[in-house]
Amino acid sequence: MTNVSAVIEDSLVDLFDRLHKLAFSQNPFHKGVVTIPQLTLLNWVSGSPGCSIQALADGLGLTAPTVSVGVRRLENAGLLERQLDPKDGRAIQLFLTTPGRELCQQAREFRRDKMRLLLKSLTEEERTMLVTLFDNAISAAEIESQPE
């Protein structure tokens, strides 16, 4: 049984590698203003406007100093801004600027186009099944990876 499991696991690794290549092929952002990791920061702030640097770092599993460097670069590019927390004048909140929101929207559309391409040859039932199976597998892995 172990050999079959290893073959399946290796096949899944190969599939994810191919998916990664597909996702980043013809990426309009790779030579732009921001890097893929910086887009990840922007995307997280987009979903959590007003977050702190520490919350951003925790959410992405990074250190606050690492995130601070990315935040500073995104601020310099005019995509992100810091504002004082109205409840605590010492704390900083992060928000996307209008160009930052537009870039996040373009990135979302790019990813959505890649997913359309990926799902194009599947029936609606197969698409639903694929999403359900991935959701089940990822949810179970998230539960398993939680510290006790």
Image (spheres, rainbow, N blue to C red):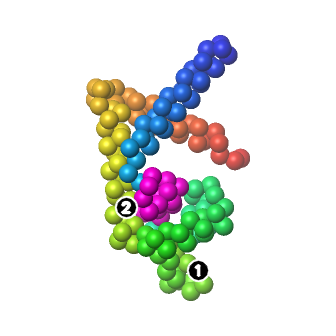
Label 2 sits on a secondary structure element that is helix
Task: Assign the magenta stretch its main secondary structure.
Answer: helix
| Percent of width and height locating residue 60 | 58, 56
Measured Cα–Cα span from mark 1 to mark 2: 26 Å
Relative to 59, residue 7 above or below = above
Q: Residue beneath label 2, please?
A: 103
129 lies left or right of 138: left
Q: Tell me the quarter of the picture where residue 4 sits.
A: top right
Query: Horizontal and vertical percent for residue 110?
Result: 35, 48
| Residue shown at 53% from the left, 55% from the top | 37
Q: Which mark is residue 81?
A: none
Marks 1 and 2, the one that precedes in the sequence: 1
Examine the image and state in which quarter residue 124 appears: top left
Question: Per the image, is 86 magenta?
Answer: no
From the viewer's perspective, is the residue at label 1 or at label 2 nearer?
2
Task: Point out the image quarter for the N terminus.
Answer: top right
Amino acid of disc 1: Ala
Residue at left 53%, top 38%? Answer: 138
Which label is found at residue 91? 1
Q: Residues within 10 Å of mark 1 (few under 14, many from 20)?
A: few
Q: Position of residue 11 (x, y in %)?
A: 55, 23
- Part of the protein shown in magenta: 30-48
Q: How many marks?
A: 2
Q: Is residue 96 visible?
A: no
| Residue 71 placement, left or right of 144 | left
Q: Residues within 10 Å of mark 2 (few under 14, many from 20)?
A: many
Asked whether residue 104 appears in the rendered view, the answer is yes
Left-right relation of 28 to 9? left
Kind of residue at disc 2? Leu
Asked which secondary structure carries label 1, the reply is strand
> Is 35 within the magenta?
yes
Q: Could you say which quadrant of the image residue 121 lies in?
A: top left
